[in-house]
């Protein structure tokens, strides 16, 4: 009798849920039944719920050639390092722990949990826009290649991930507006936004809509519903005019962080929208950052920004700035401390095992595995070096897993 008939799928799933990630990735190759269980939506949601109950994790990118050290180990957060020169040097977008990194000629989507990596060809030549009027721009702005306005998020109805990109001419006329379904892998035309979008700030996705805050000439938020593909604008809260605004997904709510200079200090005020349809904003945090003696003295106020990342189980806020620093704010004592420096903060991290993209490649997509492919993907190589699939005799795999399964199964029975 084969081992697959010894335990039911339900019992196997309960055992798999308690295994470490590396073991799960290896056991996908044992049998079609195991692979089906491990790649099911039910199993992915079960793993996600188990991980949510653990300590807060934050995904950061660092240069693969540099050794990074935390200033001190923080008991409230675990830093998950993504060693990639591209991810550490270019602005990225994230949704549900998936990372989207636009580069010239490509858009890269990567799942750090599984190592699955997709890169999509551009659908048309990307004409470089002349920006001689913007030579003064500070490199700390998050500007995407060719000055595309980018968006990345999940359609809450179909649960599919989508990429949006918009390009404007020098005269601010829309040149191209496109959307791509990650599961299909083909770009198609999208109805253009009603306003011009600036290129200095990133977007964010919350509950099935992508939000942009730099709307010209109106001072508004612009949202795109990824299911209906309809645009709508929202009014910003009072007090944001003349500040450096950033949008973020904070605890599954739309957050707006406004950084400003007042009383010889840099400050950041963070609002959250509780009811998007009613445009109901409420102030969540008001944080005093740096005194006037700080090195930002004399700089243009809109050049410095801060963005919220996540809230720990202890109720403390983690946020980062455009100088590659991660901070923690204690609301009860009104104290700010620096947790980490010289890192590119991407997003909160929760393990996500849902398969990414179609099983079969399409003409304008390349699928492979491994962190090294974020920095370089040779056209002729489709072999993974990130998760090496080790070949074991089937009897050895079965014996090892029977031992583990028996132990886990007995533990489950003893609890019931």
Image (cartoon, rainbow, N blue to C red):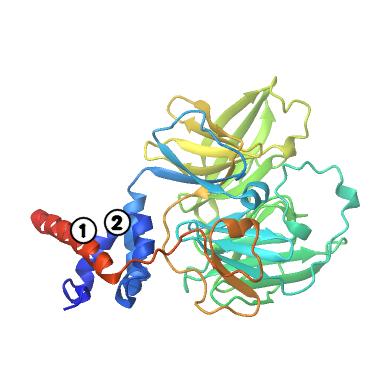
Q: Badge 2: how crowded within 10 Å, few (<14), some, or many (20+)? A: few
In the rendered image, which quarter is residue 101 located in?
bottom right
Q: Where residue 379 sits: x, y (%)?
A: 66, 70
Considering only vertical position in the picture, is 307 above or below 350?
above
Q: Is residue 233 visible?
A: no
Residue furthest out toward the right:
132
Q: Which mark is residue 19?
A: 2
Counting residues from the start of the chain, the first of labels 1 and 2 encountered is 2
Please name which of the two marks, 1 or 2, marks the residue nearer to the observer: 1
Q: Position of residue 257 (x, y in %)?
A: 60, 42
Q: CA distance from mark 1 to mark 2?
A: 10 Å
Classify residue 293 by image quadrant: top right
Residue 384: image location, x then y, percent: 52, 64
Q: Give the position of the N terminus as an image quadrant.
A: bottom left
Name the residue that disc number 1 marks. 404
Q: Which mark is residue 372?
A: none
Q: Secondary structure at mark 2?
A: loop
The answer to whether the residues at label 1 and label 2 have Cβ atoms under 8 Å apart is yes
Q: Is residue 76 left or right of residue 284?
A: left
Give the camera-side residue of 236 and 99.
99
Label 1 Cα crowd, 10 Å radius (few <14 / some 14-19 / many 20+): few
- Residue at 40% of width from left, 36% of height from top? 76
Q: Residue at x 60, y 28 (%)?
A: 289
Which residue is the extreme one toward the front? Answer: 393
> Measuring 57% from the left and 74% from the top, which residue is drawn there?
228
């Amino acid at each position: 009798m084969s081992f697959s008939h010894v335990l039911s799928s339900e019992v196997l799933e309960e055992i798999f849920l308690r295994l470490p990630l590396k073991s799960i990735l290896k056991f996908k190759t044992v049998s079609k039944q195991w692979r089906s269980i491990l790649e099911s939506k039910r199993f992915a949601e079960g793993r996600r719920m188990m991980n949510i109950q653990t300590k807060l994790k934050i995904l950061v990118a660092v240069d693969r050639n540099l050794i990074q050290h935390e200033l001190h180990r923080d008991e409230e957060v675990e830093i998950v390092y993504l060693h990639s020169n591209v991810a550490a040097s270019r602005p990225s977008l994230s949704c549900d722990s998936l990372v989207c990194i636009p580069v010239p000629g490509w858009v890269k989507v990567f799942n750090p949990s599984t190592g699955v990596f997709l890169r999509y060809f551009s659908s048309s030549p990307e004409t470089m826009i002349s920006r001689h009027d913007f030579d003064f721009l500070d490199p700390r702005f998050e500007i995407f290649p060719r000055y595309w306005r980018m968006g990345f998020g999940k359609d809450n109805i179909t649960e599919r991930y989508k990429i949006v990109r918009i390009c404007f001419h020098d005269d601010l006329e829309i040149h191209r507006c496109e959307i791509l379904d990650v599961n299909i892998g083909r770009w198609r035309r999208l109805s253009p936004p009603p306003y011009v979008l600036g290129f200095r700030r990133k977007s964010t996705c919350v509950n099935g809509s992508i939000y942009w805050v730099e709307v010209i000439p109106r001072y508004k938020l612009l949202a795109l519903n990824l299911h209906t593909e309809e645009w709508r604008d929202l009014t910003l809260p009072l007090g944001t005019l003349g500040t450096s605004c950033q949008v973020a997904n904070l605890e599954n709510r739309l957050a707006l962080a406004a950084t400003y200079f007042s009383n010889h200090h840099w400050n950041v005020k963070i609002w959250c929208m509780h009811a998007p349809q009613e445009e109901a904003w409420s102030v969540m945090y008001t944080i005093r950052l740096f005194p006037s003696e700080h090195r930002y003295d004399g700089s243009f106020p809109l050049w410095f920004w801060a963005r919220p990342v996540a809230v720990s189980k202890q109720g403390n806020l983690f946020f980062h700035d455009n100088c590659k620093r991660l901070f923690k704010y204690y609301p009860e004592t009104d104290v700010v401390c620096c947790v980490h420096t010289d890192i590119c903060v991407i997003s909160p991290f929760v393990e996500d095992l849902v398969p990414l993209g179609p099983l079969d490649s399409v003409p304008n997509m390349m699928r492979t595995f491994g962190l090294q492919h974020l920095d370089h993907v040779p056209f002729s190589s489709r072999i993974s070096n990130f998760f090496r699939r080790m070949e074991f005799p089937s009897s050895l795999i079965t014996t090892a897993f029977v031992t583990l399964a028996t132990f886990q199964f007995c533990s489950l029975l003893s609890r019931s």
